[in-house]
Amino acid sequence: MAEKIQHLTSLLNNDSKGIMNIYNLVFPRVRKFILQNKGQQQDAEDIFQKALLQITVRYQREKFEIKSSFEAYLFTTCKNLWRRELKISKNRVTNSEIIELVPAERNLALSILEQKRWELFTEKLSLISDNCKKVLTMFFNNISYKDIVKTMGYNSETVARQRVFKCKAKLSEVIKNDKRYNSLKKL
Amino acid sequence: MSIDEHILIQDFLNNKLTEKERDLVLSRMENDKDFREKVNFEKQLFLNLNDSEWSISSNTSHSEIDEYEVLFRSESTQTLKNTLHIVNSKYQLQQKKRSQSWFLYAGIAVILIIIGLTIFSPFKTSTNELYANYINLSELPSLIDRGNSEQKLLIKAQKLFEAKEYDQSLSILEQQLSTAQKNKAIIYLYTGISQMELGQFDKAEISFNTLIENKFIDSPKGKWYKALLFLKKNDVSKAKNILFQITESSSNYKFKEASELLSKL
């Protein structure tokens, strides 16, 4: 807890030494992840700086609670920002969605809300039963019903479909019942 | 939502519908608000919970966005942005230097290992070198009994042997083997070594075997020289076999040397 506050304070106070400490703790992992996922050194450096800015600005506004360690949270933020970058460049290539050219600051502001929506969805997924969590994780990651049947030991694909349907209904319910959802659904 | 509707929406999101079916869904989305919300929610579930996807927000007029944007544009955030930029450059430079020195140390370590292996490694020592290091002819017992001046031929053979004139010493030794009554074991030993030095490996093996099999007091010496013979022949596995036999008991002749030699093979 003390460390979490210490890192956040370093960012809020513009403390170079403290920020260097954060770099030493987390940057190597982020770099490795980005290099292994179609990125370059420069991407890792950009994403890391964006993530630190995102966390600082969000903390300035709402003093949100970081439930994991600061290092784990920063790593997840970087990971999500990189997923976002990949998605934007994919959309640009396929031109399936028109991505407006928005100023960097507005883009970062959008990324905070997207992160908050992602946190709501993943947090709720972790709250439903282990069995449902397992089935839905496979389902959302495009694992075929055939493989879901095999992994979960169901009798047929029909059973798997019904299970996915029921678990998804449960997840939807807990997401929609959270007060954060009302604001985030307008995104 | 019914299970049929769930399947329909999934197929729509996964582009598994025919053009006609797809048009129907799109028109329903346009006219039916509830259905549109269901489709959008399903899409959000998928984009947020699929590890390689991300849900980009399309509504840039969301009220909170402006608040965050103001904060991003604030002086304090711009100062932090500059600090992050500076710290990043400093960190990357440090890493570069660290990896350069790592390469330097790794390079030095590799050189030291190569030098070490060249000097100390048994793998770099050929079997012939090992043979030369372990054959110590000066420790061989003499062919001649003290005070027996009548053994002229053996004295000559001994001298020739010591002068490494193995060819000449061998002809005397072979002749002596058929007549000598005493010191036969030593004569076999000198014969075998001379043959070995002359490259007559098969003959040398027979000489050492005869020495070993005849149970003379000096017979055990035969095993050690037979091991050296195989070493000279570069037949490591046979050499090792004999050396293992020698190391079976610490009272065996050349027990210590045999163990040492085994560790180098």
Image (cartoon, coloured by chain):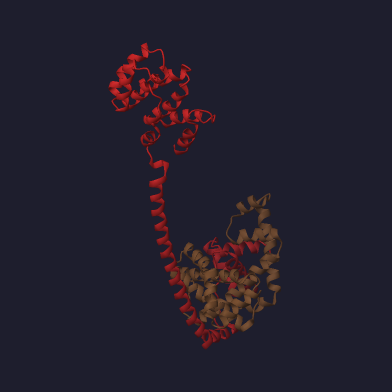
Quadrant of the image occupied by residue A4: bottom right
Between B105 and B1, the one lying in front of the other is B105
Locate residue A1 relative to residue A56 in the image: left or right: right
- The location of residue B230, given as percent across then percent down, is 40, 28
- The location of residue A75, given as percent across then percent down, is 56, 69
Between B19 and B36, the one lying in front of the other is B36
Q: Residue furthest top?
A: B179
Quadrant of the image occupied by residue A135: bottom right
Chain A painted colour: brown
Q: Is residue A146 above or below residue A112?
A: above
Q: How many marks?
A: 0
Chain B painted colour: red
Q: Residue furthest front?
A: B147
Quadrant showing the N terminus of chain A? bottom right
- The location of residue B175, given as percent across then percent down, is 32, 14
Q: Is residue B233 above or below residue B65?
A: above
Q: Name which residue lies at 66% across and 71% down.
A: A67
Locate residue B159 relative to residue A169 in the image: left or right: left
Q: Is residue A177 above or below residue B121?
A: below
Q: Name which residue lies at 32% across and 20% down.
A: B155
Between B95 and B210, the one lying in front of the other is B210
Between A136 and B12, the one lying in front of the other is A136
Res. A100 in view: no
Q: Name which residue lies at 58% across and 75% down.
A: A114
Locate residue B255 relative to residue A73 in the image: left or right: left
- The location of residue A44, given as percent across then percent down, is 48, 70
Quadrant showing the C terminus of chain A? bottom right
Res. A179 in view: yes
